[in-house]
Image (cartoon, grey):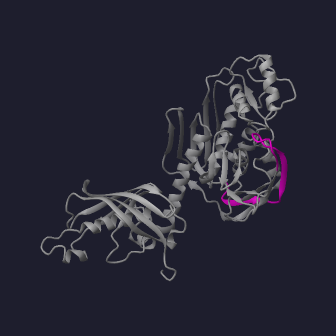
Amino acid sequence: MLELQRTIAKEVSMSGTGLHTGHECTMTFKPAPENYGVKFVRTDLGGNPEIPAIVDHVVDISRGTTLAIGDAKVHTVEHVLAATYGLQIDNIIIEMNGIEPPVGDGSSMPYVEILLEAGFIQQQSPKDYLIIDDTVMYHDEEAQIDIVALPLDSYRLTVMVDYQNPALGSQHSGLFDLEKEFVSEFAPARTFCFLSEVEALADLGLIKGGNLENAVVIVDHEITEKQLDDLRIKIGVEDKITVGKSGFLNDKSLRFRNEPVRHKLLDMIGDLALIGVPLKAQILAARPGHKANVEFAKKIRKLYQQKKLVKKYQHLKTEGVVFDINAIHKILPHRYPLLLVDKITHIEIGKKVVGVKSVTFNEQFFQGHFPGQPIMPGVLQVEAMAQTGGILLLNAIPNPQEKLVYFMAINNVKFRKPVVPGDQLVFEIEMVQQKSRYVVMKGKAFVDQNLVSEAEFTAAVVDRPKDEE
């Protein structure tokens, strides 16, 4: 696998019709600077809006993957992204004067060929690999979909599909070397669908750019010649459609014996490219689809954001510690005597954080609360929960270093047991609701796994004063 970032050497363009919209579009690939990423640019819209190829911007996965920011959308991006990822391109501008990329032959090969024509330039910055060091799993019980990421010092994908159809059957395929196998073994695999899906999509006014040259259609039910002719007219196909003996419309010949599952793997490469960084992992997938791919990509991207966050603040790796007190000093504005969190032991971005406070007799508040009967004030326990919760907001709001978090309300506060010198408080804070200007969190504090206090609080996110460090 490459160690340094790469972009393309020159600008190249291609034109054609979108699969679902049927709209004409010219797509131009342009070189991009280091650390730019992959971005789509709608040149036909005012201001030429950019849409980064990041899973956060996925708005629809019904028949392909659609990205959007505001009113700017790009449909069916997975085959283009499979091409950029498969060719290990880190930085590229993809300009489009329409809403959907040209469908080509229904595979990634047209994009691959034009990008190979452009050539590549090695850049100076290292690739930002996300190294999977713990198993990550996704399971959809209803659809019987499983996707797993396992630790591996390279990139491998194995996919299995089973649609209970004689023409398709059970198929599996694996990519083990991106550089050697992607272009020849997977990029040419065309999209496939069942005849019943074609009929349903045609009724919805979709696949306006689809034909039997850019898709393999599997016959999954009996159909008359008249119904086939009606379908041909509906989807705008000029040539006659027949049900062949092979189980595919017009007895379409496959490029690979297991072309359908290879295309599923290709789709997965494109959807997982939305993580935004190259992976070092082994991915195993059973019956994947765009919805599952995108949900899995979201999980992996959160893991990436978390690792990036920890790397930013925690320079010394310590077993069982996510952020030590030095990192917390960089994150929170609080200082003695009101910094009430010693370390963070667990964090799930936007979901949950666990912090620890060791309570000693040297705490300043014990001098007056109470002489001869030292008890930690309940209000400080709530404050410590809030500070722990503030760390949960690090990646939940833009530019967190420029923000402060203020209480708006505290509800359902309960103090169940006294906290005394020698106790170690463990705070578990979960996000309940999050909006741009305020958040709602629920906190619990434990000593020796016994609940000692709890509270729900609403906090406002405000700008930090400019002259404050």
Residue at 37% across, 77% down:
335
Query: Would you identify the image quadrant in which residue 175 lies?
Result: top right
Residue at 74% across, 18% down:
223
54 drawn magenta: no
Which segment did they paint magenta? 1-25
Residue 143 drawn above or below residue 88: above
Residue occupying the far bottom of the picture? 467
Residue 352 drawn above or below residue 232: below
**In the displayed structure image, the side of residue 172 where residue 373 appears, left or right:** left
Comparing 82 with 432, the one in front is 432
Residue occupying the far left of the picture? 372
Comparing 452 with 128, the one in front is 452
23 drawn magenta: yes
Residue 304, image x, y percentages:
54, 56
Query: Would you identify the image quadrant in which residue 238 lies?
Result: top right
Residue 250, image x, y percentages:
81, 23
